[in-house]
Amino acid sequence: MNKAVLGVDVGGTNIQIGLVAETGEIVKSKKYRMNSNSQAEAVAAIIDSIDDFVKSADKLKAIGIGLVGHINPETGVWKSAINIPISKPVPLAQLVSEKTKVPVCLDNDVNAATLAEMKWGIGKQTSNFIYVNVGTGIAMGIVENAKLIRGIANYAGEVGHMYIGQLKEGFGDGYLETICSGGGMVKQALVGINAYPDSILASYHQDGSLHSSTIFQAAQNGDHLAAIIAGQAIKGLEIGSTNIVNLFNPEHLVFGGGVFNHQSLLEKVRQHIKKNALPVSRNSLKSISITTLNHNDIGLLGAASIALMNEELS
């Protein structure tokens, strides 16, 4: 094992930590529970989880942490987040480094996943691509000439807040994320159950199995509420993806996240882009694909790639 680092993928429910080799092999990993009750408890959960994992690990070269929200990678400060209650800046890199005595770097989780794509995924074929993560939320990473485009405040790529319009019979508010993300689809279902109390989605909610995948499956089985939600999610992704292609003119468009577990969804997006994108953007787009990286591990690989990238620059 040439060079191994620790990757830490922080989500609203779990913290996944793993030792990752330079080849992208996850040598060992472990999941911990996240505590999102307050900012102090969330930060403590991250630090304590890392401390526990490090005790059983060999000497580490670096630690990379992927986080939701607004991050300043240069200062190592977690500035804010929505689904985790970070309302005041947290010098997380400093706090973890003081605890572990290991260099620590941070980045936004979708930026991190895009770095993993650069190192182990589509980046092995091209230096110009866009990675769109459609999971609990929606965001994207933009790579131009092998460089991640970050924006002036490291906040570029928040495409989930693109307004695509209120769709017929829909329960979302017209924004890409509220219509098409897994979290958005579930929220729509919870609202829609009031109007469609006989929907199978009500049972899914009661037994804890209400997810984007079960909504798509229920739609295929003829459930009316599920068909409304799935239909507008598909239409929203078609529109949003075409807007992305027209706006950024990427060479490759890559999707990740739990919502894109369905090949049929990818094909619908392909066909819509082929029909509706501007000719120059459409003709210069070489591929539309789902990431080859395991969507369950891409957050961890992304966190590790933050550390590996900083190791290479140091």
Image (cartoon, helix red, strand yellow):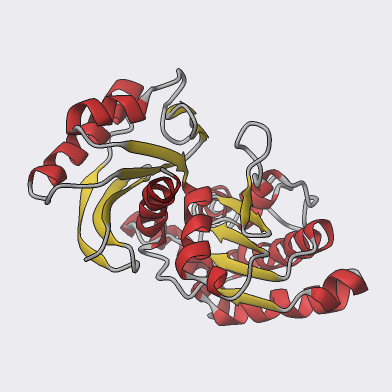
Residue 182: x percent and y percent? 52, 57
Camera-side residue of 302 and 159: 302
Question: Which quarter of the rendering shows the C terminus?
Answer: top left
Q: Is residue 257 visible?
A: no
Residue at image position (45%, 58%) is 202
**Residue occupying the point 55% across, 74% down:** 290
Q: Nearer the viewer, residue 265 or 8?
A: 8
The N terminus, quarter of image: bottom left
> Percent x, y for residue 233?
65, 62
The residue positioned farthest toward the left in the image shown: 56
Q: Is residue 149 left or right of residue 219?
A: right
Q: Nearer the viewer, residue 1 or 49?
A: 1
Identify the residue at the far top of this view.
88
Q: Measured from the top left, where is residue 307 in percent x and y?
A: 37, 47
Looking at the image, is 58 positioned above or below residue 76?
below
Res. 88 visible in picture: yes
